[in-house]
């Protein structure tokens, strides 16, 4: 996964990830940390295999590492994190070997990861589901206060 590796080693990525984990260190609700990113990647890869979706593992992991990185700017400046993540990802993707079309697909997936335009690409749809499945709501201390509906919450391990 050469592009995923380039992202992981990017100084800019490391700086944002470190800052995000610091800013959310006392967050009561779901955190957006490295563990969340790899959970989303792994679940999305399982869904890709199960449902035979045309997307490469390297693209899935790269998207997952980047999809919430803009939470830093949401926390500090109130910018919607899907938009902020795209802006940061666009910069970081310059250091990868993805083609322009592949970069666009990653950025479009990130901008739709809160549930819009999912029908455009099956990858966006499985990524969205993986993001939700990654949360162990059934053992979360914030279960009652969380604004996810009962239907959206996970009540057992699905993946
Ligand atoms: Fe996420």
Image: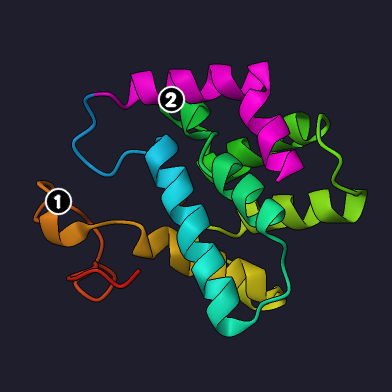
Q: Visible in this render: residue 117?
A: no
Estimate the spatial distance between the alpha carbons at disc 1 and disc 2, rounded to whole Å: 20 Å
Q: Position of residue 81 (x, y in %)?
A: 52, 40
Q: Quadrant of the C terminus?
A: bottom left
107 to 76, vertically: above or below: below
* Ligand 1 contact, mark 2 (Cβ < 8 Å): no
Mark 1 lies on residue: 140
Percent position of residue 72, x then y: 48, 26
Who's the residue at 67% across and 41% down the image?
Answer: 4
Instruction: Give the prevailing secondary structure in the magenta stretch.
Output: helix
Residue 90 falls left or right of residue 157:
right
Pointer 2 residue: 20
Residue drawn at x 19%, y 72% as measured from the top left? 150
Which image quadrant for residue 2?
A: top right
> Farthest residue in the right direction?
100
Report if residue 94 lies within the magenta region: no
> Can you give x and y, in whole percent of width and height, for residue 134 in the image?
36, 58
- Judge whether residue 20 is colored magenta: yes
Residue at 65% over, 19% down: 12
Q: Give the residues drawn in magenta, as a range.
A: 1-25
Residue at the image point whose x is 54% and y is 34% from the top: 70
Provide the secondary structure element on which disc 2 rests: helix
Q: Which structural element holds mark 1?
A: loop
Looking at the image, residue 87 lies above or below residue 82: above
Q: Which mark is residue 25?
A: none
Count of numbered marks:
2
First along the sequence among labels 1 and 2: 2
Percent position of residue 57, x then y: 66, 58
Q: How is the image coloured?
A: rainbow
């Amino acid at each position: 996964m050469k592009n995923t590796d380039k992202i992981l080693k990017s100084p800019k990525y490391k700086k944002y990830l470190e800052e995000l984990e610091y800013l959310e260190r006392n967050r009561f609700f779901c955190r957006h940390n490295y563990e969340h990113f790899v959970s989303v990647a792994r679940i999305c890869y399982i869904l890709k295999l199960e449902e035979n979706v045309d997307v490469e593992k390297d693209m899935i992991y790269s998207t997952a590492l980047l999809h919430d990185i803009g939470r830093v700017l949401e926390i500090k400046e109130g910018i919607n994190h899907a938009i902020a993540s795209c802006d940061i990802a666009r910069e970081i993707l310059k250091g990868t070997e993805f083609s322009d079309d592949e970069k666009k697909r990653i950025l479009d997936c990130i901008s739709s990861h809160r549930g819009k335009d999912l029908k455009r690409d099956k990858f966006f749809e499985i990524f969205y589901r993986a993001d939700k499945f990654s949360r162990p709501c059934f053992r979360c201390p914030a279960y009652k206060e969380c604004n996810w509906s009962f239907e959206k919450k996970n009540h057992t391990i699905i993946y």
